[in-house]
């Protein structure tokens, strides 16, 4: 088959003259060339119809050992992206925490009229993302069947923020899984008095949300630089609408866009390689600024009433 395709592509290249093949092609070339043609000879002589296209090579020979090599290389690249302290300080809090620390919240939606295959797609789409990012992703799918899942995630955001007083920026979906439910049998009438039995699924979908600790959130956002899309887009929109001062462009540089994030990671790598980056000191300063930003609204309201600001919680 490959020899036949290559021979056909060689014949197509031979039919086009060198002078014509060196000319750049325009987008409406096919429409312009076929507009006033009346014979097959003139159509076959058109350079647009005889232009050879590049051959699509399928992903063949994708053996398990080759897949394992690719996964190992990806894991090495992810490990290289981290910057860890050179000396562990026992007085400092750890960087990573267990996901099953008992502080997670579970939310489940019942009697979903969606099959398990589609629910698995939704689970893969939102697992490991920030809760607001997961809401934006499911909403961008624009499917009517996704409305119950979207409503469940929005209710989870409201409940975590209002009832449990959790930080919405640090809410992450660490587990999302569908659960098989019952089937509802219905009759469907056919012609000539016949009927059939239809089995419609009623499945479950559960997400587990946790508030990421501030130390781990610092490492994910500032060091590993995996910024949620909703956070970056809100920052860019605030700068575009002049809702913040231009000074924030410099402070938000590690989070704004892919270009600024890459420059930030390169700068951190250079500071770490030249022994100028103190991980724990940078984390303490970043956490102090983050907590002050969280208390800024309440502090300004108390100052307007002539009250002293609340002390910052550790």
Image (spheres, helix red, strand yellow):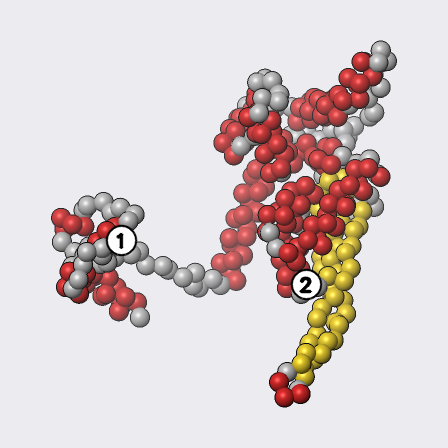
**Residue linked to disc 1:** 31
- As displayed, is residue 218 above or below residue 107? above
Whole-percent x, y for residue 74 in the image:
54, 47
Residue 162 image label:
none
- As displayed, is residue 274 above or below residue 234? above
> Is 95 in front, or is 113?
113
Counting residues from the N terminus, which is met first, the one under dot 1 or under dot 2? 1
- Bin the neighbour count of mark 2 within 10 Å (Cα to Cα): few under 14, some 14-19, many 20 and up: some
**Residue 94, can we see it?**
no
Using the numbered discs, state the Cα–Cα distance from disc 1 to disc 2 in whole angstroms.
Answer: 44 Å
- In the shown orientation, is residue 207 left or right of residue 66? right
Whole-percent x, y for residue 270 in the image:
53, 26
Whole-percent x, y for residue 205 in the image:
73, 57
Whole-percent x, y for residue 272 in the image:
58, 27
Which quadrant holds residue 1? bottom left
**Residue 43, can we see it?**
yes
SS class, disc 2: loop
Q: How many marks?
A: 2
Quadrant where the C terminus is found in the figure: top right
Which mark is nearer the camera, 1 or 2? 1
SS class, disc 1: helix
Residue positioned 61% across, 55% down in the render = 143
**Residue linked to disc 2:** 114
Residue positioned 71% across, 35% down in the render = 169
- In the shown orientation, is residue 183 left or right of residue 8? right
- Bin the neighbour count of mark 1 within 10 Å (Cα to Cα): few under 14, some 14-19, many 20 and up: few
């Amino acid at each position: 088959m490959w020899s036949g395709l290559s021979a056909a592509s060689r014949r197509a290249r031979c039919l086009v003259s060198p002078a014509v093949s060196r000319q750049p092609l325009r987008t409406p070339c096919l429409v312009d060339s076929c507009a006033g043609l009346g014979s097959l000879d003139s159509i076959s002589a058109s350079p647009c119809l005889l232009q050879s296209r590049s051959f699509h090579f399928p992903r063949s020979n994708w053996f398990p050992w080759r897949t394992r090599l690719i996964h190992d290389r990806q894991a090495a690249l992810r490990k290289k992206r981290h910057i860890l302290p050179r000396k562990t300080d026992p007085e400092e809090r750890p960087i990573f925490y267990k996901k099953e620390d008992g502080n997670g919240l579970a939310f489940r939606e019942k009697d979903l009229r969606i099959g398990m295959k589609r629910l698995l797609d939704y689970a893969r789409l939102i697992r490991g993302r920030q809760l607001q990012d997961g809401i934006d992703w499911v909403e961008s799918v624009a499917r009517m069947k996704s409305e119950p899942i979207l409503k469940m995630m929005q209710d989870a955001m409201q409940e975590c923020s209002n009832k449990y007083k959790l930080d919405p920026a640090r809410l992450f979906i660490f587990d999302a899984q569908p659960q098989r439910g019952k089937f509802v049998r219905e009759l469907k009438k056919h012609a000539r008095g016949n009927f059939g039995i239809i089995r419609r699924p009623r499945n479950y979908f559960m997400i587990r949300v946790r508030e990421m600790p501030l130390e781990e959130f610092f490492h994910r956002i500032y060091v590993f630089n995996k910024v949620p899309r909703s956070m970056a887009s809100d920052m860019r929109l605030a700068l575009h609408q002049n809702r913040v001062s231009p000074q924030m462009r410099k402070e938000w540089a590690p989070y704004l866009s892919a270009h600024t994030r890459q420059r930030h990671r390169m700068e951190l790598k250079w500071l770490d390689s030249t022994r100028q980056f103190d991980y724990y000191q940078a984390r303490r300063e970043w956490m102090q600024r983050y907590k002050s930003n969280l208390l800024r609204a309440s502090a300004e309201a108390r100052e307007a009433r002539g009250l002293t600001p609340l002390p910052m919680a550790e």
